[in-house]
Image: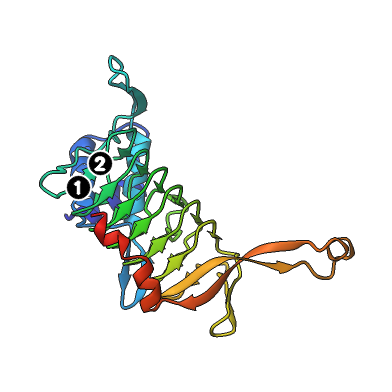
Amino acid sequence: MDLKQRILELAGNPPKEEPQNFRELFHEFLQALEKGEIRSAEKVDGRWIVNSWVKQGILLGFKYGENRAYDTESALHFFDKHTYPTQKIDGVEKNIRIVPGGSSVRSGCYVGENVTMMPPMYINAGAYVGENTMLDSHVLVGSCAQIGSGVHLSAGAQIGGVLEPIGAMPVVVEDNCLVGGNTGIYEGTQVGAGAVIGAGVVLVRSTPVYDLVNECVYRGGHNEPLQIPKNAVVVPGSRPIKNHKYAESIGLHISTPVIIKYRDDKTDAATTLEHLLR
């Protein structure tokens, strides 16, 4: 029986107490996640799909995990499920830099080669971070979030996570994207390859994104994520509040992201500093 079948069998009828041989099964499961052999979401035929069984496996770790103290004798100590200690990354072998200062990478996530992490930042279980990606200070990569290769997550960028419901799509940031400082990307939003998300932009499923180039509006639906087109350059914008007498009388606007252009040679020239930093 393969790993997927064993996880599904256990998740379908989980006993109250930790089942026999669970720790061996869960260790194998975590190793597969950390090697990138399995993912909580993946692109199939041009469309992102959720691997619900992987999320079920992650949840089993919380169900049977015991809260324990770690490193209580040192200056850095914490309390967490014994199934999710911090990950022991072979940083030298993979040329990964984790600069000292309070960063943490949880077990059960994949970190590719040549990734640089500036303190403090955090990667949660089930997440995937592709090679040659930069995670700047105060970055959060939430549970099951999918970050591509060659991405820069600037200081303070928050990439939301999701475990339940198990069918919920995690946030996806595809290859070669630049995500500006103090941004928030949540609720399964998908950012296409090469896009630039300007500082301060917040994207959720219900956010209308106005495309000034193609003169259209992008927004997610009940079962569909918000999708930002590849190479789009998204900046903070605003629009007036209409059909409200008081708001109109004092000139109130509501914030909304705007696609101001699509990435070109000038945009790329402004981001070549990324290559010099690595």
Q: Position of residue 59 (x, y in %)?
A: 37, 44
Query: Which labelled disc corresponds to residue 154?
Result: none
Q: Which residue is rendered at x = 55% and y = 69% of the image?
A: 220
Disc 1 target residue: 96
Density class for disc 2 (Cα within 10 Å; few <14, some 14-19, many ≥20) is many
Q: Position of residue 198 (x, y in %)?
A: 49, 62
Q: Which residue is rendered at x = 33% and y = 45% of the image?
A: 125
> On screen, 40 above or below 262?
above
Q: How is the image coloured?
A: rainbow
Q: Position of residue 142 (x, y in %)?
A: 41, 48
Q: Amino acid at mark 2?
A: Ile
Pick the front one: 223 or 43: 43
> On screen, 114 above or below 232?
above
Examine the rendering and report whether any part of residue 226 can be seen.
no
Pick the front one: 97 or 148: 97
Please state the total of marks drawn on the protein image.
Answer: 2
Q: Amino acid at mark 1?
A: Ile
Q: Tell me the quarter of the picture where residue 275 sits.
A: bottom left
Query: Does dot 1 land on a helix, a strand or a loop?
Result: loop
Are discs 2 and 1 less than 8 Å apart at CB? yes
Pick the front one: 76 or 14: 76
Disc 2 target residue: 98
Q: Position of residue 80 (x, y in %)?
A: 36, 29
Density class for disc 1 (Cα within 10 Å; few <14, some 14-19, many ≥20) is many
Tell me how far mark 2 sits from mark 1, CA to CA: 7 Å
Q: Tell me the quarter of the picture where residue 131 sits.
A: bottom left
Q: Which residue is rendered at x = 36% and y = 78% of the image?
A: 265
State the residue lying farthest toward the left.
Answer: 93
Left or right? Give the position of 96 relative to 165.
left
Q: Quadrant of the C terminus?
A: bottom left
